[in-house]
Image (cartoon, rainbow, N blue to C red):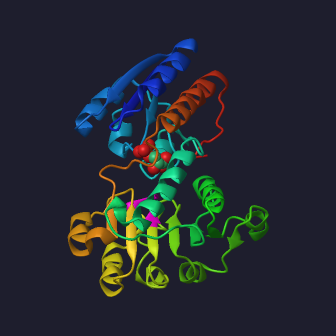
């Protein structure tokens, strides 16, 4: 079988080498399309692929239609808002992600962002410490849990809101379950977002929630830019000159935010939450193993479109 790795943002070499070894050991062929600049290149490359590994690359209905032999797509990472699951299902293509494999890298970035913003983005002037501050984690999944553990080790008080996780589970891990999202925003110096982009969450973080944050509050977004209502974010930042926003996923209106709010906002130039060699190796190799297991045994663990 031919496995195509199509990554506009390439994996570290160690990850590509590992994927190649796993594919070869199972008798599969590997093709690599990295740093492509036009979706036409992607569309051309999938023409003879039986399996596909991507990162945030958009696997649209058009891509699926251009891949007549495709049987499995694995998003090497957690968020799968870049996969057209309906198009995959319509063609009987199995779609998977690799949950948890790059979580630590994202969690470390969320912590780094809190410190960066607390220290005036490493520019001169008196900053503040995160020790003793309260952190609210929105979605206590693979990343949220790791952020909580690291924040606790740094002396923060940690709260979390997640309708899918029992309060007792959070309490066992030393995290206070928030009564509601509103209560969490009202109680926390930092809010760290770990929700996926879904029809329910897109645009859900806006004026009502952000304006509840206490004086000096900082919203940290290592999730997806789409979950923010950017117009409402700008309105709050305008009214509340004490609040800050830091994001790993530059807002569509980032240039405007930067111009209006200066040092109170910061966006990474390119999404870098999972940009560590470790995360690339973990997620890339997991993706390759999942493909091999699917072809060898029909294993559909981690299938998203069951
Ligand atoms: C994820 O959903 O796994 C992260 O956002 C990482 O995305 P990336 O592979 O594009 O860096």
Left-right relation of 281 to 66: right
- Residue 301, horizontal then vertical, whole percent: 66, 39
Number of labels in the image equals 0
Q: Given the current orientation, which residue lies at the most extreme bottom position?
A: 239
Corner quadrant of residue 65:
top left
Q: Where is residue 244 in the image (x, y as percent from the top left)?
A: 38, 73
Compared to residue 271, the image places residue 290 above or below, namely: above
Q: Nearer the viewer, residue 163 or 161?
A: 161
Is residue 230 part of the magenta span, yes or no?
Answer: no
The picture quadrant where one finds residue 52 is: top left
Q: In this view, does 107 lie to the left or right of 32?
A: right
Seen at 39% across and 71% down, the residue is 126
Q: Which residue is drawn at 27% across and 34% down?
A: 36
Magenta region includes residue 221? yes
**Percent from the top left, x then y, of residue 21?**
52, 16
Magenta stretch, residue numbers? 220-225
- Closer to the camera in the image, 156 or 97: 156
- Between 85 and 22, the one lying in front of the other is 22
Q: In the rendering, at what x and y percent does residue 9 appear?
A: 35, 38
- Could you tell me which residue is drawn at 79 percent across and 63 percent down? 172
Residue 92 visible from this viewpoint: no
């Amino acid at each position: 079988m031919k496995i195509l790795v199509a990554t506009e943002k390439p994996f570290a070499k160690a990850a590509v080498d590992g994927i190649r070894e796993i594919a070869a050991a199972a008798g599969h062929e590997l093709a690599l399309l990295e740093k492509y600049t036009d979706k036409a290149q992607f569309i051309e490359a999938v023409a003879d692929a039986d399996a596909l590994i991507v990162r945030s690359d958009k696997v649209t209905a058009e891509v699926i239609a251009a891949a007549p032999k495709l049987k499995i797509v694995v998003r090497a990472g957690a968020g799968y808002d870049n996969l057209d699951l309906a198009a995959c299902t319509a063609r009987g293509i199995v779609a998977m992600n690799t949950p948890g494999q790059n979580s630590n890298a994202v969690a470390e970035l969320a912590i780094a962002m809190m410190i960066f913003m607390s220290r005036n983005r490493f520019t001169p002037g008196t900053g503040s410490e995160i020790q003793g501050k309260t952190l609210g984690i929105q979605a206590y999944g693979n990343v949220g849990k790791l952020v909580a553990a690291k924040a606790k080790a740094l002396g923060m008080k940690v709260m979390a809101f997640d309708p899918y996780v029992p309060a007792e589970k959070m309490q066992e891990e030393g995290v206070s379950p928030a009564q509601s999202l509103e209560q969490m925003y009202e109680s926390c110096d930092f809010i760290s977002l770990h929700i996926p982009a879904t029809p329910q969450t897109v645009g859900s973080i806006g004026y009502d929630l952000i304006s509840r944050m206490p004086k000096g509050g900082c919203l940290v977004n290592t999730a997806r830019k789409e979950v923010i209502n950017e117009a409402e974010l700008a309105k709050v930042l305008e009214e509340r000159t004490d609040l800050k926003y830091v994001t790993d996923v530059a807002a569509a209106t980032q240039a405007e935010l930067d111009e209006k709010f200066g040092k109170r906002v910061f966006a990474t130039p390119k999404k870098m939450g999972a940009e560590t060699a470790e995360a690339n190796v973990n997620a890339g190799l997991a993706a390759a193993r999942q493909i091999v297991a699917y072809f060898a045994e029909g294993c559909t663990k981690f299938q998203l479109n069951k």
